[in-house]
Amino acid sequence: MLAAVLLLAHAALWLSYFKGFRLDVGSIDLPTPRYLLLAAMMGFLGIPVVVCLALAGGRGLRAETLQRWRSAWRDYPDRRSLVLLGLMGVLIPLAIQSLLLGHAPLTDDEASYQFAARLLASFRLWVPSPPLKLFFDNGFLVNDGKLYSQYFLGWPFLLAFGMKAGVPWLINPLLAGATTVAVFLVAREWFGSAWARVAALLCLVSPLLMTGAATMMSHTAVLFALAWLLYCVQRSRAGAGAAASAGVAFFFCLAFWTRPATAVGLGGPLLVWWALGLWRSERRGVPARVGAFLAVAVPLAALFLAANAAQTGSPWMTGYHAGLFYARANAFRFATFAPDSASGEGFWYFFVDRSPWLALGRGVVALFRLSVDGFGWPLGLALACLARGPHARWMAASMAGLWVVHIPVADAGIDSFGPVHYSEAMLPLVLLTTDGLRTLWRWAWAQGRPGLVPGTVAGLLLVCAAMYLPPRWTTLALLARDVRTPLEFVEREAPVPSIVFTQHPIAPPCQAAPARHFVFTRPNNGPDLDDPVLWANHLGVERDRELMKRFPGREGYLLVVSRKDCQHRLVPLDQASPDRFPSPVKELPSDFPPPSP
């Protein structure tokens, strides 16, 4: 009864003060006021809910009943578990995609990944910049004579298979399902089948993991690679042959191709663990294992450098650096970052503020946000602190490594559904939490109160479902609706073929206000500019008409949105007034060179 009253009190707070479960997200660094309120209420009201259910479980669940449940759980077939858990790992993100997001992007990054995937699906790394290229500048694209995504190619490579099959939205959910399977296999080696099912279920109930898998961001792909890397490391340490070491190399390289810093920070300790296993094993098999590792790692490393050279002109220059150089040459027009956030020189151009206090503070903020968003329950890291043994030490080292490599990064990531730059920390966190639950379970049995543990878990899941998810997912659904509105309007109203000129931002926050999303720019076109409706930056009516001459047969329109009522409309370009729709950016002499005599 008390737990129900506390949950009603939490709902009353949001309904009375904010007229619904609405957050004010829109930050990449410090938490917003309503987010802090949510975290505080999860502690103030949520912890008592957990305590109530834990006490109810401790008193109401008899040891005989728990023993029957335990036996049934332990004896459930592993093969059936793998199928069901993997399937749920696919279906939950698909449900979030369809029912919550409506397949809307949550960040501009997703459009850049899709552009790279379309290039790779056509067996290209770049295309020549189109004429009057400023019209086609967009966030996270390099457009310096070559047009390509600034991002690394690991995730676009996987996404390209979905592009070819016409189901790009399916790839991340498939990877999430495969990650769940890998977590089960690793946990089974460490803790046994019964606790492996717990570890896999923790993946499935993590709002951060499942929502991330519903997007087209790269974090799910690198988490997939790191989970299978960990499995191959475990198999190698258990005495498996050269194939396991080849798997270590392949999955580390895939992670590095996707998010290099994350691969080094989180995967680096796993490589050390693998190498120590070789050092302590029988010497006869070591050369074959090392040879298998190098046979995979060396070609993939060479291919990584070759891709850099093909895109940027140098094997040692990444797309990130080329994007910075282009943004500077282009006076940061249509760039997604401010000049002062990337004012450094050399490889670490983004490492602007090197204060150790700031680095520590950002790490604390990231850890706080991860503790709230990882599982959506209070004291999200507490169970992980109960983990014991050598496995726990290596998982903690991986989390520490991830934090270290993110010291130069200025933020923990967008807060639409969690600190995305630290999403991959959920891999060690899930395994540490599983181990912590084992420790708590053994203690509860020793105290003669085994029902405390299932009661505690039920309380934590109830807090997530009744306190964390309503404001989180309600806000996310409204943000997605704001993003979809202009896209659906153009799809419905724009004639084919046509060019739609857009201003910034394309989708201002309307229904979700005061929350703000992170989709500021228009969608990207296909690499060959052959889509039925092309998107272009508005550069002034007269300049827009110049572009139309390059595309005879298409009609031109300006996409206009009213900030008062959030209504969109298409203004025919031949009816648009230059005075009413001026250029939003300053023109440079190189943008529109005079025709050759």
Image: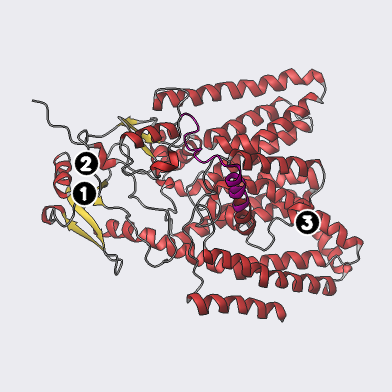
Identity of the amino acid at label 1? Ser
Identify the residue under disc 1: 583
Q: Is-magenta flag for residue 161? A: no
Is residue 550 left or right of 223 when viewed as pictured?
A: left
Residue 532 makes an appearance in the image: no
Is residue 387 left or right of 25 when viewed as pictured?
A: right
Identity of the amino acid at label 3? Leu
Quadrant location of the N terminus? bottom right
First-in-chain label (1 vs 3): 3
Identify the residue under disc 3: 437
Quadrant location of the C terminus? top left
Q: CA distance from mark 1 to mark 3?
A: 59 Å
Q: Nearer the viewer, residue 586 or 453?
A: 586
Tell which residue pokes out farthest to the left in this image. 597
Q: Residue at x 49, y 52 (%)?
A: 28
Q: CA distance from mark 2 to mark 3?
A: 61 Å
Identity of the amino acid at label 2? Glu
Numbered-mark total: 3
Q: Which residues are magenta?
A: 346-365
Is residue 57 left or right of 462 when viewed as pictured?
A: right
Q: Which mark is residue 587?
A: 2
Picture coordinates of residue 593, whole percent (x, y): 17, 32
Picture coordinates of residue 185, whole percent (x, y): 72, 44
Dot 3 crowding, Cα within 10 Å, few <14, some 14–19, many 20+: many
Q: Residue at x 29, y 65 (%)?
A: 563
Mark 2 secondary-structure assignment? loop
Residue 127 makes an appearance in the image: yes
Q: Nearer the viewer, residue 57 or 142?
A: 142
Q: CA distance from mark 1 to mark 2?
A: 8 Å
Q: Report which quarter residue 399 is drawn in.
A: top right
Dot 1 crowding, Cα within 10 Å, few <14, some 14–19, many 20+: some
Q: Report which quarter residue 322 is drawn in.
A: top left
